[in-house]
Amino acid sequence: MSDVNTGTGTSTHIGTGKVVVNRAMSLDGFIAGPDHAMDWIFEYLTTDTFPEVMAATGAMLIGRGTYEVGKRMADQDTAYDGGAQFVLTHEPPVEPDPAVTFLTCDIEEAVATARSAAGDKNLEILGADVAAQCLRRGLVDEILVYVVPVLLGDGVRFSPPGLGRIDLEPFSNTQSGAVTMLRFRVRKQPRPSGS
């Protein structure tokens, strides 16, 4: 494990797992439908569709919007055991959630904190905005996409406008029922000076 200074005068041990953007996507490129609806995903994906992904995950870093969608869907029995959950937000909720650690730091410190909790397993990144921030900063090792056989027509796109070009290297595709899992390595680009 390596150490990272978090800017708070302390260092955090970073695990050896990968940082993986994990998302389900409709065939027309949406990761959520209108009003951030994600119930369509669970018509196709369950926790036993690709169990090796959950087994390899030690922690999750989630955007606030994705966290709120997950709370709304809690009654649908969509539990996913991806280890410790961290939510990156500008404003933590008034009522704490004992199952979640809310972070208000920058994206690099959030990734370092969550990777530390993941240990030698992977850190899963969920949420369009958090994933885009990680991709912009060169913090992502892999992208994992579950392609679901549905056309949503509208919603939240896989990547936001202005993300810029990111080159990927495909290394795996697997079919499970109606769902195809595609995996890509992110080709690391030299980081701009001053970042």
Image (cartoon, grey):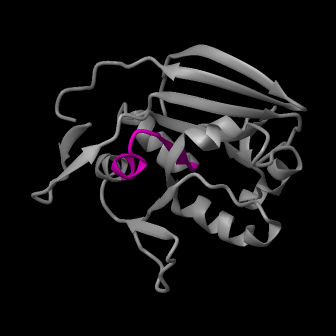
Q: Residue furthest bottom?
A: 95
Horizontal arrangement in the rendering, residue 3 relative to residue 62 (left or right):
left
The answer to whether 56 appears left or right of 178 in the picture is left
When the figure is inspected, residue 171 is found, relative to residue 112, above or below; the finding is above
- Residue located 45% across and 28% down the image: 141
Q: Nearer the viewer, residue 83 or 73?
A: 83
Q: In which quadrant is the N terminus drawn? A: top left
Where does the image place residue 40, in percent across and percent down from the top left? 85, 51
Q: Residue at x 31, y 47 (%)?
A: 112
- Asked if residue 87 is positioned above or below residue 134 in the image, the reply reads below
Quadrant of residue 28 in the image? top right
From this view, report whether residue 143 is shown above or below residue 98. above
Task: Write the start and end of the magenta stretch as one range.
Answer: 114-127
Instruction: Give x and y (percent) for residue 92.
Output: 43, 75
Quarter that holds the C terminus = top left
* Identity of the residue furthest to the left in this view: 9
Residue 121 in sight: yes
How far across and down, in percent of the image, does residue 102 sit? 42, 68
Q: Is residue 116 magenta?
A: yes
The residue drawn where x is 49% and y is 86% is: 95
- 44 horizontally vs 140: left or right: right
The x and y percentages for residue 94 are 46, 85
